[in-house]
Amino acid sequence: MHASFWTHLDTLIRSSALVIDRPKGFSRPHAPAVVYPLDYGYLQGTSSSDGEGIDVWRGSLPEGRLDAVVCTVDVQKRDAEMKL
């Protein structure tokens, strides 16, 4: 992968407010056994394929840098989405 890909994503993250709407330890209302192991939210002012902000998992490293891009696929919904 070209280095500019990661640079552009880092710039997007630094220039967008991160909204944590599911903090670490949060249980999903419709699936209480599913507990978020990390903070989960979205980048305010961005949009993803679902029409919402780009999803972000905030890890535990103190520098908070981007180190992965995950593509999720929901076959039943026939939907794919990127998460940072």
Image: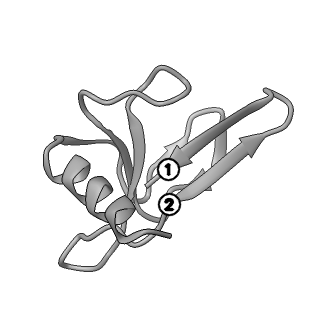
Element on which disc 1 rests: strand
Crowding at dot 1, Cα within 10 Å, few <14 / some 14-19 / many 20+, comes out as some
Kind of residue sitting beneath label 1: Lys
Query: Nearest the camera: 23 or 6?
Result: 6
Q: Residue at x 19, y 79 (%)?
A: 62
Q: Along the horizontal axis of the image, is 36 left or right of 18?
A: right
Query: Residue extending furthest top?
Result: 51
Residue 38: give x, y in percent of width and height. 42, 63
Query: As drawn, is 73 to the left or to the right of 45?
Result: right
The residue at which mark 1 appears reads as 83
Q: Residues within 10 Å of mark 2 (few under 14, many from 20)?
A: few
Q: Report if the CB atoms under discs 2 and 1 are less than 8 Å apart.
A: yes
Looking at marks 2 and 1 on the same chain, the residue that comes earlier in the sequence is marked by 2
Residue located farthest toward the right when viewing the structure as drawn: 76
Above or below for 13 versus 47: below
Q: Please state if 72 lies on the left or on the right of 78 as rendered.
A: left
Marks 2/1: CA–CA distance: 6 Å
Total number of numbered discs in the rendering: 2
Q: Which is nearer the eye, 69 or 28?
A: 69
Disc number for residue 69: 2
Q: Position of residue 25 (x, y in %)?
A: 43, 58
Q: Secondary structure at mark 2?
A: loop
Viewer-closest of 3 and 30: 3
Residue 77 in percent (x, y) is at 79, 26
- Which of the colour schemes (rainbow, by chain, secondary structure, one colour) is used? one colour
Q: Residue at x 62, y 52 (%)?
A: 71
8 versus 50 height, above or below: below
Residue type beneath disc 2? Val
Write the residue at 55% across / 27% down: 49
| Apparent side of residue 44 relative to residue 32 in the rendered image (left or right) | left
User: Where residue 84 sits: x, y (%)?
Assistant: 43, 55
- Residue at left 28%, top 79%? 61
